[in-house]
Image (spheres, rainbow, N blue to C red):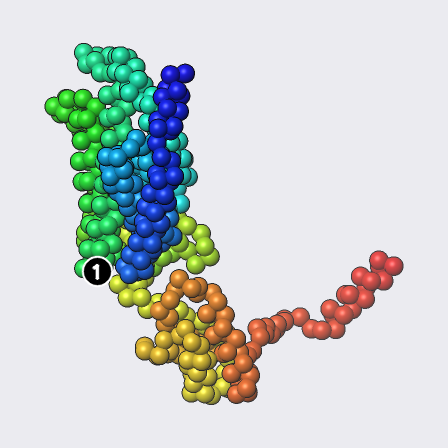
Amino acid sequence: MEFLENLQAEFRHSAAWIEVACVLVSLGVAYVSTAWAGRRAGAKPESVWFGRGTLDGLMFPLLSLALVYAARVVVGHYQSVFILKAAIPILVSLAVIRFFARVLSAAFPSSGPMRLLERLVSWLAWGVAVLWITGLLPSVLAELEDIHLTFGKTTITLRTLIEGAMSSGLVLVVALWVSSTLERQVLMPSISDLSMRRVAVNAMRAVLLLLGLLFGLSAVGVDLTALSVLGGAVGVGLGFGLQKLAANYVSGFVILLERSLRIGDNVRVDNFEGQITDIKTRYTLLRAPNGKESIVPNETMVAQRVENLSAFDQRFNLTTNVVVAYDSDVQVVRQVLRDAALAQERVLKDPEPVAYLLNFAADGLEFSLHFWIADPAKGQVNIRSEVNLAVLAGLRAAGVDLPFPQRVLHVQGVSVSPVLDASRTAVGGAA
């Protein structure tokens, strides 16, 4: 084929060893510079520029591309170049792949569709690189330009559609990168409240993605004035069929802005008790101590009664009850209960545990021990069990009796002998 013959001719007229040396030197300098910059900047694994390693970030392919392009310009003045020219599209594709991969993995760390999108971007980038190197890219673009697609009264070419989709994707990924960078560099140091930070991040990401979407639509050739009709239709849809969904979204922002409920609070909603682990725009996630998760619509969190067990305080109250014999020393029992709670590391010293004489029960004196912990997410049953074991050991060591239920049956109006006579008669008759 003609393009293969052209490639062979270019390779024969070039001094391959000089170009290979330039490429190796450029890659070596880029590697050393990227490694030095990463150590100096203290790069973290989620960094887009450096990634988890020197070759995993965006800095290495960009710096290599700049050095290889400079070498191509210099060497091109003295001889025909082939390897340097082929290295440029390879490094461009690598830079695009690294950028998409790092941004998507940082924004969506455990998303399967994002992994699929990364692979699609990689295949597309390497395909364009192959067409670029072989010289077929202009011919392919010309063929795509000749294919026309009609949408109503609008006619666009397939090339315009593909370029618009690619530019839209690039702009959206850039928007995600900018929002993640602003969150990490600006919002996290300046806003300590996690809920307010989530509001700012969601609002900023929504605005940037909307601007990116509008830019992508204009790049494709869509008339943005037509979106006014679409906006009216969406408004009607929100007013009728999507009112519940819209209410959940609005309620989510209300919760985050008012800070009536915050991430980390322990709440009880509709007889489900758990800790708020995340507040999404549509729903709130609650995790119970036994590991169960409940997805509660935000409208429920706003419109219905919600018990905030934390009350903006991470101290969490737990109780345990015990019954002792009536002849027990009340002061000794109270001291044993307090000491058993204070002996546990997770139990707070302030406020200190308190033991109350709760009730005069049928079997003995009923005491209630109240104590507080600051880490309910680590479990409540386990710490209550440790306190109960310490209470049991302490009461036994102090000689305090733990009574078991006793019942006395009084039979009135019937003598014992007739009953015995009747039983003997029944036994004899049966025989």
Q: Position of residue 19 (x, y in %)?
A: 34, 38
Q: Nearer the viewer, residue 248 or 215?
A: 215
Whether residue 291 is situated above or below residue 410 in the rendered picture: above
Nearer-the-camera pick, 72 or 191: 72
Q: Image point 38% across, 29% down: which residue?
A: 11
* 251 left or right, relative to 417: left
Whether residue 429 is visible, yes or no, is: yes
- 350 relative position to 229: left or right: right
The answer to which of 421 and 237 lies nearer the viewer is: 237
Asked if one can make out residue 87 in the rendered structure from this viewpoint, the answer is no
Question: Badge 1 local density, few (<14 within 10 Å), some, or many (20+)?
Answer: few
In the rendered image, which residue does mark 1 sit on?
Answer: 189
Which residue corresponds to the image point at 23% horizontal and 34% vertical from the top-left?
Answer: 77
Q: Quadrant of the N terminus?
A: top left
Instruction: Give the residue at x 78% y 69%.
Output: 421
Note whether 257 is above or below 392 in the view shown.
above
Residue that appears at 52% across and 87% down = 398
Left or right: 79, with 228 as reference point? right
Left or right: 212, with 45 as reference point = left
Above-or-below relation of 77 to 203: above
The image position of residue 78, as x and y in percent, is: 26, 35
Q: Position of residue 323 (x, y in %)?
A: 49, 76
Q: Amino acid at mark 1?
A: Pro
